[in-house]
């Protein structure tokens, strides 16, 4: 019995899919578009970087550049506490695999 090359490619593609990422939204006031972008960037930067600080810096920079004239803050870790003041429309706190991510825009 032989397997066609197309069938081999299909099986190969299935094995190369990334494992699912566990995401739990804890609190969110972002628009659906910004929420999707936040999750996409978080996934992308965790694939590129191993250090939480580097992922946080890249996410912060991306949002500083996206919404001009604003200052964003990003905190990533497995354990942390904080007290922040933020613009009520721009706040998200979620768990991404084993990491907690806090992203918010400062009030102007």
Image (tube, rainbow, N blue to C red):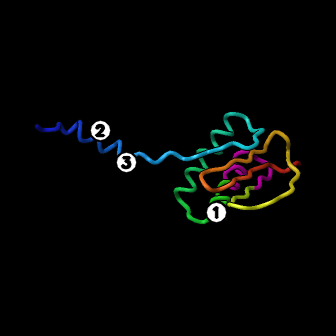
Q: Is residue 49 left or right of residue 68?
A: left
**Mark 3 element type:** helix
Q: For mark 2, what is the residue?
A: 10
**Which label's residue is closer to the chain start, 3 or 1?**
3
Q: Position of residue 78 (x, y in %)?
A: 68, 60
> Could you tell me if the residues under marks 2 and 3 are in contact, i.e. CB atoms within 8 Å?
no
Q: Position of residue 41 (x, y in %)?
A: 60, 48
- Alpha carbon of mark 2 to alpha carbon of mark 1: how far? 35 Å
Q: For mark 3, what is the residue?
A: 16
Q: Hey, which residue is sitting farthest top in the picture?
A: 32
**Mark 2 element type:** helix
Magenta-tinted stretch = 60-73
Using the image as rendered, state which of residue 8 and residue 107 is in the foreground: 8
Using the image as rendered, state which of residue 1 and residue 88 is in the foreground: 1
Q: For mark 1, what is the residue?
A: 52
Q: Crowdedness of circle 2 by 10 Å Cα count: few (<14), some, many (20+)?
A: few
Residue at (63, 39) in percent of width and height: 36
Q: Quadrant of residue 91?
A: top right
**Which label's residue is closer to the chain start, 2 or 3?**
2
Query: Is residue 20 on the magenta stretch?
Result: no
Residue at (64, 56) in percent of width and height: 99
């Amino acid at each position: 019995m032989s397997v066609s090359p197309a069938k081999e490619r299909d099986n190969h593609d299935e094995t190369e899919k990334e494992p699912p990422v566990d995401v739990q939204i804890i609190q969110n006031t972002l628009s659906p578009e910004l929420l999707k972008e936040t999750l996409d960037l978080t996934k992308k930067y965790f694939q590129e970087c191993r250090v939480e600080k580097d992922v946080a810096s890249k996410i912060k920079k991306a949002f500083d550049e996206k919404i001009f004239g604003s200052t964003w803050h990003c905190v990533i870790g497995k354990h942390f506490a904080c007290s922040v003041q933020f613009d009520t429309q721009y706040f998200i706190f979620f768990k991404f695999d084993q990491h907690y991510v806090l992203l918010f825009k400062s009030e102007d």
